[in-house]
Amino acid sequence: MAVYCPKCNYKLRVRDWRQECPQCGVNILYYGIEDSLRKEADEAEYHHAMAQPKYDRLKFSLIGHPLSIVRLALGLLPIVAMLLPMGKVHYVLPFGETDKTVNLVSIITRLTGDTDIGLLPKLFSSGVIGRGMIFYAAALAALVLTALIALIGFFFLCLSCSPHGMQRNLGFPIAGICTATLSFVSWCLCVNALNAALPGVFSGSVNPLAFLGAVLCFGAMIAVNLIYKSKNIQVKYKDVSELLLPYDERPSTLQKKTQQGA
């Protein structure tokens, strides 16, 4: 229990057990609670007003304009393109023949399976398949990098309306085109080198449509972002400037008090 009355500063005694002050009659327990609640509400509304522009930019980046929706839909298409068959390999072992289709899923499954990646650098020095293995490693690295660029670029699409958002939206697809092209060229060189080094044992082919699909998807993202920039589309912000003012100083509050006084 309080020692003094919060209103009249009356010193309370042991026998003053009621909630009301015996001097001024105010309810000691609930005195000033409306002001405390109003202050907490003001602080909550102030933080909301400060965060509202960030929310508006996030929403506009995703669904605020038809081009934003198109850009978002294009974001994952490069990954879908890399799920297409990138080529086929056929090799003859002492106890049988094997045919395999190569795509992003099969490569990741092989890398995370029982394959000993540590053997790959040792194959680089092989006089027979060393050149092909170097191109194979380059193709794998470029392909994984392309997938990472697509995923990271898709994440940053949510921040398109933030500072440097347009630079990121253009930079990631350009980098994706470069890595996808590098992967395609490396795969072609790898298959040609192994076909020449292991005739009758290994044969492979490359499907350019998978790589071309990824490049076209990245190119479409660049085109959409350039159109977006050329139209100079602006974010639509919700006006919450009133919430930055104390409650008693807000125009709506003053207007309400004026109407009540009239």
Image (cartoon, helix red, strand yellow):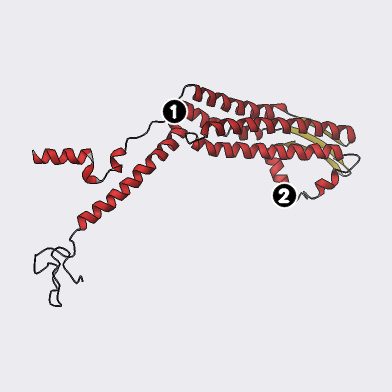
Q: Which circle marks residue 234 in the picture?
A: none
The three-letter amino acid code for the residue at tag 1 is: His
Q: Residue at x 24, y 56 (%)?
A: 36
- For label 1, the SS is loop
Q: Mark 1 against mark 2, which lies toward the viewer?
A: 1
Q: Residues within 10 Å of mark 1 (few under 14, many from 20)?
A: some
Query: Position of 181 compared to 254: left or right?
Result: right
The three-letter amino acid code for the residue at tag 2 is: Gly
**Most extreme residue toward the bottom, as rendered?**
14
- Residue highlighted by disc 1: 65
What is the quadrant of the C terminus in the image?
Answer: top left
Between residue 190 and residue 84, name the one nearer to us: 190
Against 121, is 4 above or below?
below
- Residue highlighted by disc 2: 113
Image spot of residue 241 (x, y percent): 31, 38
Q: CA distance from mark 1 to mark 2?
A: 43 Å
Image spot of residue 64 (x, y percent): 42, 31
Query: Position of 28 compared to 232: left or right?
Result: left
Q: Quadrant of residue 1?
A: bottom left
Image spot of residue 242 (x, y percent): 28, 39
- For label 2, the SS is loop
**Mark 1 or 2, nearer chain start:** 1
Q: Is residue 198 visible?
A: no
Between residue 95 and residue 191, name the one nearer to us: 191
Q: Residue at x 19, y 58 (%)?
A: 32
Q: Quadrant of residue 235?
A: top left
Image spot of residue 172 (x, y percent): 60, 34
